[in-house]
Amino acid sequence: MIRLESLRKVYGAGPGRTVALEGVSLVVPAGQFVAVAGPSGSGKTTLLNMIGGLDEPTSGSVSIDGHDLGDLSEDARADLRLRRIGFVFQNFNLVPVLSAEENVELPLLFQRIGATERRRRVARALERVGLTGKRQRRPAELSGGEVQRVAVARALAGEPALVLADEPTANLDHETGRAVIELMHDLNRESRTTFLYASHDPELIRLANRVIGLRDGRILEES
Amino acid sequence: MTLLLRLALRNVFRNRARTAIALLAIAIGCAALIVNGGLIHNIFEELREDAIHGRHAHIQIYRRGYTDHHLGDPGAYLIPRAESEQILTLVRRLPHVERAARQREFSGMIAAGERHVSFVGIGVDPAEDAAFSRHVLMRRGEPLSARDPYEIICGLGLAEKFSGEPGRVVTLMTNTDSGALNAVDVTLRGVFEGGMKAYDDWTLKMPLAALEELLLDDRTEKILILLDRTKSVPEVQRTLDGLFRKQGLNLETRTWRDLALFHNQVVGLFNRELDIIKIIIGTIVVLGIANTIGMSVLERRMELATLRALGIRRQAVAGLLFIEALITGLLGGALGVILGCATARLVTTVGIPFPSPPGATRPFVGGADIVPEMILFAFLLSLTATLLASLAPIWKAWRWRIVGALRGA
């Protein structure tokens, strides 16, 4: 479960300061498929970065499954991300010199999972995203949608409790983007993994069970 | 091969042109050290062989106390004939000993017509002298002969002082141990070049038999030993010292290294110069590679931030970059060793004409020896320089904030 309390994030100081989040409080129970909606600059990425422990709030708190991220060291936050949180990025962010299966395997290696189990999990994750046949291809040899599916497989292979996807469809055409969101939704139903994805595409937002609307760093509406 | 190593290897060859330049920079630095070290080693060898086979042999044996005190009372440190024969018999039986011969130094004056010239003389066994003087070149005439004890050979500079040409008869004058003046007529048989100007300007050699007659004394000052190889010197010296203690012989030993002051000074000077070159080459490699590794890390900023976002600790990311630098250093060093050895071989085949070193009389054609210690040092220096060069970029990556780096900021 994700719990945010009075979360505030301010960048810079003085006249140039930017308030990215202002008093955001939120609870996301396990297993939800949540869209974070809002226009560009509304604070969606900052919110996901705070939840993922990639950035620190100016005030307020974030807790994941009871762990207050503010109490954790840098290494402990990294360990939490490694074992409990999967990330899908707007720019895919795969390692270009590794094949699809090696990209999926990489985080598992750092979880110290044995080779046999790693291979099993990689094969399963790629199968779930429909890329078994292309497992040895490098990102440059895959289409945009396929690359993002590899990124989803990488996020899922570690069997995380939570997957954070920041504008996962922004660099994909509409159809491919929709397919990726539907794939994430299927996986959410299948594995009860919590998904939070940021988007400003109304059609893709409608695919979520729950929508959190952000504007100027504040939650405006929830549905 | 683990995935991490595969990743590091592929990252190293991600930008092949840049990696090639980095490897070449490391390799050239490494090769420069190997060739320079090889050239200096070759010069050392030349000087060492000159010292051993021109003047000092491998080991010298004296009466105990000779080294420190003989100038004050030379007569007190001479070895009686019978004892010197006993020593020669003992020494010649030892492993690694090729030759052993008696020698005695003296000084005096050459009277050649109107000219009177001071000299430093060495009484030698004429049958053995050629073997002990392999690096001494006969410029005119012949080496000493066992057939006629009343012949001498002298250095180029000394010969010039009295216009000495082979066949000329001169008178040698010297003081005996008791202080009496004695003289003997001898024929100049040959003129040699020993390689050191000071040696050639003052030295003459004559057979011990004639010298003993001149000095009215058959005692020996020192016994010279030639070994089968220079590497055996410490072992044979230990054996000799032990043997002398056991036999109750009151003797001391000195090796060529103790005696070859000129060689030691040159080695000290060149080694210092080599140290400076090592520092310069190391610095050039560090500066050259730091920029390349820095560029590579900067270009992968978002990718490295992604790894950290996925939960890979910054230590592990730094470790990955360090492994990449290690691979670069190993490959560059290995390439440098191949390049260095090939260049050294080429240099040796072609030969580099060197002018005569300070104080020496003849130029020589040098090569670049392939020295295992220098190869190992150059390889390790290249590796260390590459790892050092990677520290600044790694430290930079260590301090990146994930969010900023993901944005490419």
Image: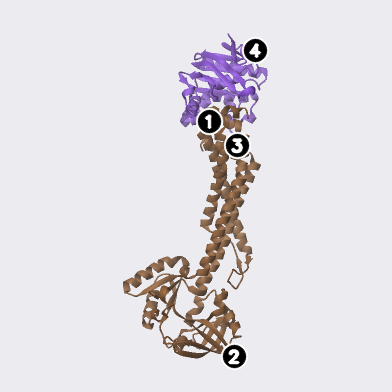
Chain colours: A purple, B brown
> Considering only vertical position in the picture, is A81 above or below B141?
above
Do dots 2 and 1 share one subunit?
no
Do dots 4 and 1 share one subunit?
yes
**Residue found at the far right of this picture:** A173
Subunit of label 4: A
In the image, which disc is placed on residue A202? 4
Secondary structure under the numbered disc 1 in the rendered image: helix
- Classify mark 2: residues with Cα within 10 Å, few (<14), some (14-19) or many (20+): few
Q: What amino acid type is highlighted by mark number 4? A: Pro
Nearest to viewer (mark 4 / mark 1): 4
In the image, which disc is placed on residue B114? 2
Please give the name of the residue rendered at 38% of the width and 82% of the height, measured from the top-left corner.
B80
Alpha carbons under labels 3 and 4: distance apart: 38 Å
Q: What amino acid type is highlighted by mark number 3? A: Val
Residue assigned mark 1: A106
Where is residue B25 shown, x and y percent of the image? 62, 48
- Classify mark 3: residues with Cα within 10 Å, few (<14), some (14-19) or many (20+): many
Q: What amino acid type is highlighted by mark number 1? A: Leu
> Considering only vertical position in the picture, is B275 above or below A11?
below
Do dots 3 and 4 share one subunit?
no
Where is residue A77 shown, x and y percent of the image? 49, 26
In the image, which disc is placed on residue B297? 3
Subunit of label 1: A
Marked residue nearer the N-terminal end (4 or 1): 1
Alpha carbons under labels 2 and 1: distance apart: 96 Å
- Classify mark 1: residues with Cα within 10 Å, few (<14), some (14-19) or many (20+): many
Alpha carbons under labels 3 and 1: distance apart: 19 Å
Do the numbered discs 2 and 1 sit on residues whose CB atoms are within 8 Å?
no
